[in-house]
Image (tube, rainbow, N blue to C red):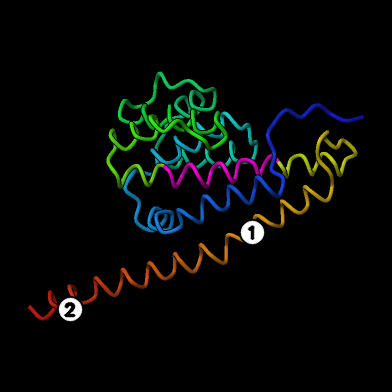
Amino acid sequence: MNRKFDKRIHDIKTQNEDIRKLLTHKDAFVETIVNPVISKAFSESISLAVTQVNGCKLCSYTHAKNALKAGMSEEEVEYLLSGDFDNAPKEQLEALLFAQHYADTKGSPDSDAAGKLRDTYGEEAAKDIMSHLLIIMLANLHGNTLEAFKLRLRGKGINGSSFWQELAVLVNFFKIAPVILPGILLYKIRRNERSYPAELELKEA
């Protein structure tokens, strides 16, 4: 008997589209990972806001744990996971509302909302926020697909999907690694090369 499963999951087509969005944004994403503009607590708040919409169990656990490590209180985390932003810092509110909107629209936000995000935070911080949105959306649906696959292995497969579709999605996810990881390494090397002459001048002085 099939169990009702009302979370969104990926198929290869939708996953490839989300991967394409991330890789199109690759340079900004790499810079966000290596040299972030927004704080760790801010980025985790964004991840929790999106995860609340998509309902990924694994992401909820992981980002709640990360948020606590970043200095957020248990109460703040619980509010975000319930979709309540009343207790969120005022400077984060516009980003959290946009994150929720982004997830609700399946990654197709209103252009006015995207423009307001840039106007509120500036170009660099807005790039950071978008980078976190892109990766958490991809991770959420990957996590939901993994949950669906585990149910299928227990004989409780969900309607509208299949064993091979879910397996293909789980494997396909990892094709981002050969693109993103070298980019992070190259960014670090270039940053070190830029900082080395300045350090040498200080030592010589």
What stretch of residues is rendered in magenta? 130-144
- Residue at image position (58%, 47%) is 18
- The earlier-in-sequence mark between 1 and 2 is 1
Question: Pointer 2: what residue?
Answer: 200
Q: Position of residue 140 (x, y in %)?
A: 61, 41
> Would you say 182 lies left or right of 18 here?
left
In the rendered image, the vertical position of residue 114 relative to residue 201, given as above or below: above
Mark 1 and mark 2 residues within 8 Å of each other at the beta carbon: no
In the figure, 139 relative to 201: above or below? above
Name the residue furthest left: 205
SS class, disc 2: helix
Q: Main SS type for the magenta part?
A: helix
In depth, the one of 6 and 147 nearer the eye is: 6
Q: Which residue is mark 1?
A: 174
Instruction: Using residue 26 as the reference point, say whether residue 19 is left or right of it.
Output: right
Picture quadrant where residue 59 is located: top right
- Amino acid type, label 2: Leu
Q: Quadrant of the N terminus?
A: top right
